[in-house]
Structures are given as structure tokens and as C-alpha cells.
Image (spheres, coloured by chain):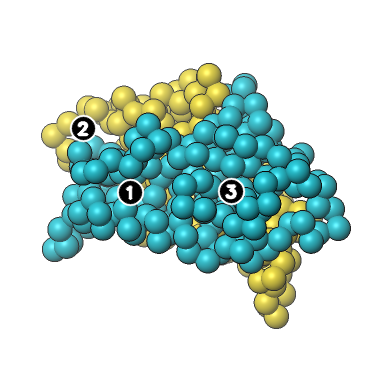
Chain colours: A yellow, B cyan
């Protein structure tokens, strides 16, 4: 049902295997200057959505955004986010929980280094570096799909653990 | 601040004019098989995010999604959504309010026709057509930007009205 509108688009290509989807998802997460659409919500139930550069250390997503931004406020209050990477027809969708929130000066150096290296931007170099907050997010669920024939088996990581086979 | 990470990317290209941005945004909204990232929130403050096909009638966004989906539930309870179209570096960002919510059989024929024509998919043809809900959303604010040099002037529509100049 989810991707019924894409039924038309089912190509001759069969659905990717779990291993291939996982490799493709990791490639999208690791790509230089990868961006994510980051959805968060206020306690009052208003959704926010922004594109942000990410860092990916192999297990965690690192985000840096002004501490005064709506996204930072929502991440701080809810400790939850939903991230989309890739295109609308080559989706990597991540439900994540905030496991670290740090003013830039107090951020774990490894997390900041991963972010700066991948994004090509080191916020610590900015004159207003103290206006930024670094968040570390742990994926709790990760799904990846392209077209309707990949809806089955789209969940690759569940309860923060990579599963070993498509389900 | 918002797009500091993209400062590097400022090309020789000057920021687009208001009129060009508006034309570009309307082209993205009107494109055959346009998709949007649709962010909604539950009353409990959990953000949801999905890619959905859209219909654009020149003033309103039409979405069709299963009435049992999280997105439909959130749209029904909050009557708000935030939509992103285009890429993360060619953004059209829309804050919208729900002005119509209809079981498919009771949907305004013009809205359904716009959706079916643009998406290439008519949900009324599905055997489980009664499982779908059609939503009509009115953009309250629309912003469009590419790189850091387009952050100024990114708001093209405010209070549901196109503004006449970049601000």
C-alpha cells in the first residue's frame, strides 16, 4: 500500500538483497557531503523539517545546527528525529534517538572530526562557533527501498541492531 | 547561519530574483510525478516523515495516503504539515495547513483529477480505494533556496500570499 503509486515503476530489476541494500544505505550515509532531511517535532505537535549536512561514523549520525534553531530545540526536548537520505525513489529512512547533545566546545573530538571531514565544514572554525550544538543520533530503525517491489524487506535495522535477513 | 555549511558552494551564480525563484518553485511543484517529503507530528510530539506523490492545482497541494497511515492520522489531528520538494541544495520548503480531508469516494473530483493526472496514479482505480484519504493542503509559507547566497529572500509566500519582492 505504502508505495502503490510506484507500482508502475517496477522495473525488470528484482528487489535488492538485504546485503546489497545495507551496502547501498551505508554508501549513502558515508558519501562526502551527504545531506539528510531531518524531521523533528515540538512538544506541541508541530513538525519541523530541514536539510542538514551529516557525519556518519559507521554507527551514529552527527548533526551540527545552531542551538537557537527549531531543530535543536526539538532534538533537545524530544530526543527523537526521523531522517531521510537519498531520493524519494531511493530512500534511506532512519528513526533515531539523540544519545549526545553538546555545545561545540564540549563536543567529543571524534564526533566533530567525523562531521567536519564528511561535510567539508568545521563549525569550530566559525567566529560564532559557540552558537552551535552538536548532536549524536543513534539509529533505532533503518529502512531502505526504491520501488514498490522493495517494500517487503525494507527494514534493515531494528531496535538499533542490523538484522541479518530481509523480513 | 542556516546554510553556513554551504558557504563553500557559493558559485559565481548570483542569487535568483524573486520572480525566478517563484517560477522555479512552481515548476518543481507542477512537475509530472513530483514527490514531496511530508513531515507531520503526532500530538505526543513524534515526528513522522514519508515521501509522497503530490498534485498541485496552482494553489493547493493534494496528497493521497491510506487513512490508516501515521501521516493521515497526524494530518487529521494537527491539520499541519511541512513539505520539502526539490533537492537538499535546491529546496522548496512549504508550511501548509490542511483545508480538506476526504475519503476518496467523497473527494472533490477536481482535486482527485489533479492528483491522478500529475502523479500518473488514480487511487480510485484501486480495489481498496476506500482505504485512502485525500487531503488538500494550503501553503501558508513557502521558501526556496539553493545555496548560502539565497538565504536572504528565501520567503516567497507568507500568510498564504505570494509576496511581491524578495525580503
Task: Give the letter of the chain under mark 3.
Answer: B
Q: Position of residue A23 (x, y in %)?
A: 58, 63
Tell me what residue is drawn at x 71 percent, y 61 percent.
B122
Image quadrant holding the C terminus of chain A, namely: bottom right
The one of B5 and B100 positioned closer to us in this rendering:
B100
Tell me what residue is drawn at x 56 percent, y 55 percent.
B55
The one of A155 and B14 positioned closer to us in this rendering:
B14
The nearer-to-camera label among 2 and 3 is: 3
Q: Which mark is residue A129?
A: 2
The one of B161 and A116 positioned closer to us in this rendering:
B161
Q: Position of residue B166 (x, y in %)?
A: 21, 43
SS state under label 2: helix
For residue A72, what is the image quadrant? top left
Q: Are marks 1 and 3 in contact (CB under 8 Å)?
A: no
For residue A163, above or below residue A135: below
SS state under label 3: strand
For residue B93, above or below residue B40: below
Task: Give the letter of the chain under mark 2.
Answer: A
The nearer-to-camera label among 1 and 2 is: 1
Q: Which mark is residue B62?
A: 3
Image quadrant holding the N terminus of chain A, namely: bottom right
Q: Are marks 2 and 3 in contact (CB under 8 Å)?
A: no
Residue A29 appearing in the image: no
Whether residue B140 sits left or right of residue A116 in the image: it is right
Q: Position of residue A89 (x, y in %)?
A: 57, 62
For residue A161, what is the image quadrant? top right
- Mark 1 or 3 closer to N-term? 3
Task: Give the letter of the chain under mark 1.
Answer: B
Residue for badge 1? B144
Whether residue B16 sits left or right of residue A134 in the image: it is left
Question: Is there one chain holding both mark 1 and mark 3?
Answer: yes
Amino acid at each position: 500500500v505504502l508505495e502503490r503509486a510506484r507500482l508502475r515503476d517496477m522495473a525488470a530489476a528484482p528487489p535488492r538483497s538485504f546485503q546489497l541494500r545495507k551496502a547501498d544505505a551505508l554508501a549513502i550515509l558515508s558519501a562526502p557531503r551527504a545531506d539528510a532531511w531531518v524531521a523533528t517535532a515540538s512538544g506541541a505537535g508541530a513538525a519541523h523539517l530541514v536539510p542538514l549536512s551529516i557525519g556518519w561514523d559507521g554507527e551514529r549520525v552527527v548533526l551540527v545546527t545552531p542551538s537557537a534553531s527549531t531543530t535543536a530545540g526539538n532534538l533537545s526536548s524530544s530526543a527523537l528525529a526521523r531522517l531521510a537520505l537519498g531520493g524519494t525513489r531511493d530512500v534511506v529512512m532512519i528513526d533515531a534517538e539523540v544519545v549526545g547533545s553538546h555545545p561545540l566546545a564540549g563536543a567529543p573530538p571524534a564526533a566533530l572530526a567525523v562531521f567536519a571531514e564528511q561535510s567539508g565544514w568545521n563549525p569550530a572554525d566559525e567566529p560564532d562557533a559557540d552558537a552551535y550544538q552538536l548532536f549524536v543520533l543513534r539509529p533505532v530503525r533503518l529502512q531502505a527501498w526504491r520501488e514498490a517491489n522493495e517494500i517487503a524487506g525494507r527494514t534493515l535495522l531494528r531496535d538499533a541492531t542490523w538484522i541479518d535477513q530481509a523480513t
